Each structure stands twice: as C-alpha cells, then as structure tokens.
Amino acid sequence: MLPSATILVISQAPGRIAQNTKTYFNDASGDRLREWMGVTREEFYHSDKIAVMPLDFYYPGKGKSGDLPPRKGFAEKWHAPLLAQMSNVQLTLLVGQYAIKAYLGKRREKTLTATVQRYQDYLPDYFPLVHPSPLNYGWQKRNPWFQTDVVPDLQARVRVALQ
C-alpha cells in the first residue's frame, strides 16, 4: 500500500513465484501486465505511483486449471481501510475475474469478455482487464480487439496517471 500511488492494481492473489519472491506480479503474468500498461519493471516497482492490492495477500494454492481463488472475507476485511489511505489514486485496474466480480458485482456483464470489451462503461472508477496469465493467451488470440483497442487506451491512461 502506497499513499502516494496514483494507479491501483486490484488483482486476485499472488501466484506461487510472487509469494516465494515476496514481490507481486514477479512472474510471466507480471511481465504481460507491465507490457499492457506500458511501464517498465522499474516504474512498476519503484515509482511510488503504482500500488498492488490483491484480494488475498497469500498464494491460495494450485487448483485444477490454475491457482485456487482468493480466500473469502480477506478483501472485505482489509480493502476498505487500505483504500482510505490512498487518496491520490486516479486509475484503478481490476485484473481478472475475481477482482472484477468483487468490485463490479452485478454491474458487470454476463461474461468476462463482455465486461472487458465494455471497459469504458466502468470508467473513470474502474478499468477491468482479463488476467494476464499465460493461461489466457488463447483468450487474447480469440479477442484481437483487446490488443488493438483496449491496450492502447490503458497505456494512455497509465501515462496520464503517472505524470
């Protein structure tokens, strides 16, 4: 949590590598997320402008098709007091289905794809994104609009928020 942060990344939970290295998004998902945002590793971790607040602070374990979901109740307990300390946030990224569900609730579309495709409907409060996991590369190939339309807009908004 950084009180100076102008960009907040809300995500599911750290992966196994991130948990072991004690650094959020320190894996292939993080590389892809930083690429989408148009920021360097240095900017992401050391600018004091980007904060990461997962729905769970600990790796939840391995499931059948990826990591298990974040524990219930953790975000409900910790997010509000942490958010109260971050008054400079201009851009909040909701990364993945768990973050989107937690923050958009019934306002989200019926599918993750439709929610991300209609990301502008949630601005300026939230910018929903599919999770950058390598498991989602197939989704990205089936949805080329994400790379051509969403990513450039995300990068422009990130640049503004970082200034």
Image: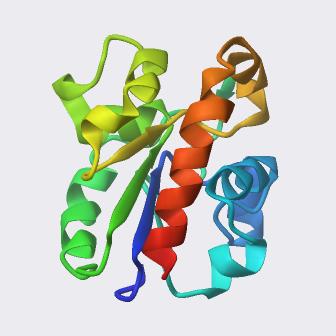
Seen from the viewer's position, the closer of residues 13 and 146 is 146
Q: Residue at x 47, y 59 (%)?
A: 157
Q: Residue at x 46, y 71 (%)?
A: 160
Left or right of 85 on screen, residue 158: right
Give how far across and how far down residue 82 sits, in percent.
Answer: 27, 73
Seen from the viewer's position, the closer of residues 27 and 115 is 115
Seen from the viewer's position, the closer of residues 142 and 155 is 155
Residue 47 seen in this snapshot: yes
Give how far across and how far down residue 15 sits, in percent.
Answer: 67, 49
Which of the 4 image quarters holds residue 81?
bottom left
Residue 58 seen in this snapshot: no
Give how far across and how far down residue 25 sits, in percent.
Answer: 68, 59
Give how far across and how far down residue 152 sits, in percent.
Answer: 60, 46
| Number of numbered callouts drawn | 0
For residue 90, above or below residue 33: below
For residue 90, above or below residue 69: below
Q: Residue at x 31, y 53 (%)?
A: 75
Which of the 4 image quarters holds residue 86?
bottom left
Figure coloring: rainbow
Q: Residue at x 67, y 51 (%)?
A: 33
Q: Quadrant of the N terminus?
A: bottom left
Left or right of 65 on screen, residue 150: left
